[in-house]
Image (tube, grey):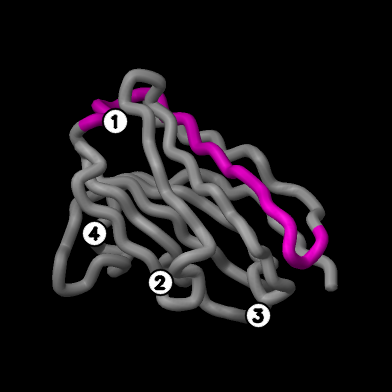
Amino acid sequence: QVQMVASGGGLVQAGGSRRLACTFTGFRFGDYTMAWFRQAPGKEREGVSLITPSSTTTYYADSVKDRFTVSRDNAKNTLYLQLDTLKPEDTAMYSCAAGVYNVYSPFNRANFAYWGQGTQVTVSS
């Protein structure tokens, strides 16, 4: 049974940092491209970042480039997202997903077979 548990969310002041983690069981973590998505109230879900199986390629949405860093530890079946220089507009539910890398449409939800429950990040101004 596939399980994905996200953690690390919370309340943080603007300019602060947070580290999110997503731990997976039930499938071969090291075979999959992993991604972070987020959804703010009243907005559609958007892709934030992704990382290929061997960490060879990482990809970021323009809105988080140079502020967020994605990484993974295949031995621990865990995906990470370091959030730095947080802004109020980063407030959202952050969730993780497992799938394949599509160079033409990296954050297309059809690329991702497994989805985890999210962790809430709230940035106060």
Left/right of residue 79 with respect to residue 43 in the rendered view: left
Residue type indicated by callout 3: Gly
Residue type indicated by callout 2: Ala
Please tell me how crowded label 1 is: few (under 14), some (14-19), or many (20+) other residues with Cα within 10 Å: many
Note whether 8 is above or below 35 in the view shown: above
* Label of residue 42 in the image: 3
Mark 2 = which residue?
61
Q: Secondary structure at mark 4?
A: helix
Q: CA distance from mark 3 to mark 2?
A: 19 Å
Labelled pair 3, 4 in contact (Cβ < 8 Å): no
Residue type indicated by callout 4: Asn
Give the quarter of the image for residue 110.
bottom left
- Residue 118: x and y, percent? 59, 49
Mark 4 = which residue?
111
Labelled pair 3, 2 in contact (Cβ < 8 Å): no
Q: Quadrant of the C terminus?
A: bottom right
Q: Nearer the viewer, mark 3 or mark 1?
A: 1
Labelled pair 1, 2 in contact (Cβ < 8 Å): no
Please tell me how crowded label 3 is: few (under 14), some (14-19), or many (20+) other residues with Cα within 10 Å: few
Question: Reading the chain from its start, which is encountered first: label 4 or label 1?
Answer: 1
Question: Reading the chain from its start, which is encountered first: label 1 or label 2?
Answer: 1
Note whether 33 is above or below 109 in the view shown: above
Mark 1 = which residue?
29
Question: Reading the chain from its start, which is encountered first: label 4 or label 2?
Answer: 2
Give the quarter of the image for residue 79.
top left
Q: Secondary structure at mark 2?
A: loop
